[in-house]
Amino acid sequence: MTPIHVTLSVTEDVLESNLGVQAARARIVRLQSSRHGDSPSPTVNTKYGKLKGKRLRVKGIDQAVDGYFGIPFAKPPTGPLRFSPPKPVEPWKSVKDATAYPPMCVQNVKFLADLERLAKNGMPVLTDSEDCLYLNIYAPENLDKKAGLPVMVWIHGGGLVMGGASMYDGSALSAYENVVVVAIQYRLGILGFFSTGDEHARGNWGLLDQVAALQWIQENIANFGGDPDSVTIFGESAGGFSVSALILSPLTKGLVHQAISESGVALLPAIISIDTDTTTYVKNTIANLSNCETRSSVAMIECLRKRTEEEILKATNELNYPYVPAVVDGIFLPKSPEELLAKLEFHPVPYMIGVNNDEFGWVLSAGLMNISNFEEGMDKEVAIKNIDIFPTGLPHEHNLILLDEYIGDTTDPQQIRNGFVEALADALFVVPAVKTAKLYRESGHPVYMYEFQHRASVYDDIRPKFVKADHGDEIGFVLGGPFLMNEVKIIEEATDEEKQLSRTLMKYWANFARNGNPNGNDLPKWLAYDRNEHYLEINLQQEMRKQLKDDRIKFWTEILPKRIDAMTEEKKEHTEL
């Protein structure tokens, strides 16, 4: 794979012109735990010790929620445990305070905050640390511990290099839908995914952390009122990728019962390496940036274990390849995701897959590309120069075929920009999602698909009018953003129609967690993704449609391969001459 480069900084003009001075202030200081009046502090016993949490309230409903934050599910992956599978957490004797958010895993925290401002999200002010294997739990108050409620496990996104559990708040979903919500963390970047490509460091440490969290949930969630036999994993972007990968992995047998991938699946070309060349390139680049020898895997690992968190993060930020990808390690992933899907080698659980209708509309494009006057459009030369910034899984000459398909002969800057962002959205999100749905459908197990289309009114003052439903825009509706009362702010300002949309999505998602089917008596009918390729179009109103972006899918699956073959044959003829 050709090395590519993304500048991990959000341009000042984007921040200042769209968000104002106040929004651009630095947020990264230690979080002070909030208090909720004189509410009693709930307690719960786990296999490893007792926890003290705090009571949370949400808007529009009397049901309170007990929150337990910073629960360790594995030993700190530090020292000799760096680049090792997670180990079980040690028990504790005294009551552990679980009222403050844990540190996120090591990452570029400032860059994360910049992206969150572009999305107009308010998150708790958080630190980062290598000691980060924690989870947060939201459970309806005063539960009978034998209640056996559905468990919904949220896996955050962020390209496997950033993000954290405490950026999200499960209290509204828990209160309104009577479910137990768990948000988990996993190692990121070099610390989470560095691989030597052999037995000395197979990689996928972050994915193994997710497995460890699911094992902890099996052992302990009944004490929070959850049903260990009804665990739904759901996540967005890299979190959706993780969900998709987890149901392909033999390590999660019996740990997952339903799965939801939002804007990310295991076929996503950006964050998984299925060839040894990319793995070797990333491995050697990391070693060189860290001043470690590359002569042997053992020496490389020993050297990297001696590096400080700051040195590791510095190397991550300097990588030409923007992600440290997951790999086919032979353990978590015994084969490539495409091969596992094609051979129907995955867990037979109900699966929901979805995308948004403008995945590359603003946060990813404005946040990761330093293109001036992006709102006014772009020249074709700029499109050609930038098409390789994001890993489509294609070399440059094949990416030019994409631009020819999506842009054509137009010279209009806005049409060029729109075609450019659609090409990348399809390459990275839409086409992999549809391919996955079609392959999973062959197993005979239920698949449900959606396209989220609503642009929230809260974005009207910070996003250009051409942006539709951007990457991540559905999250606030799924998690009940309009009803949150705590530190997390997602679509805080919502119209009455948007509040109803949030209620609708919470119901669909929770019904799916309860029954493996999103339908309910008071909801528009959602048909399964069968031979007719039904999908739900989600806007302020919901409608069933067929064959999502069928013309584009045919281009990717039929026309593009033929054009690539023709180009290859032409090159061969020129070489022979």
Image (spheres, rainbow, N blue to C red):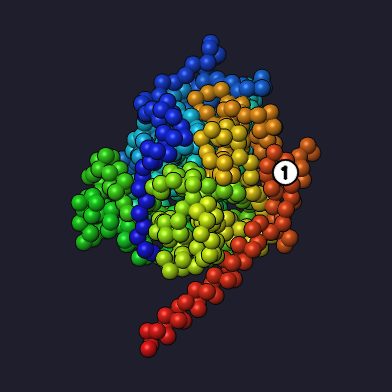
- Does residue 394 sit above or below 501 in this rendering? below
Residue at 61% over, 40% down: 455
Residue at 40% over, 84% down: 574
Q: Which residue sits furthest right?
A: 521
Instruction: Tell me the quarter of the image containing the N terminus.
Output: bottom left
Which amino acid, mark 1?
A: Gln
From the image, tell me which residue sits under label 1: 542
Question: 423 and 1: which one is in front?
Answer: 423
Instruction: Tell me the quarter of the image containing the C terminus.
Output: bottom left
Residue at 46% over, 64% down: 399
Question: 51 and 132: which one is in front?
Answer: 132
Residue 106 in view (yes/no): yes
Query: Which percent across, then down, holds residue 182?
Result: 54, 35
Residue 226 in view (yes/no): no
Q: Which residue sits furthest front?
A: 411
Residue at 46% over, 59% down: 380
Query: Which percent across, then down, holds residue 386?
Result: 41, 56
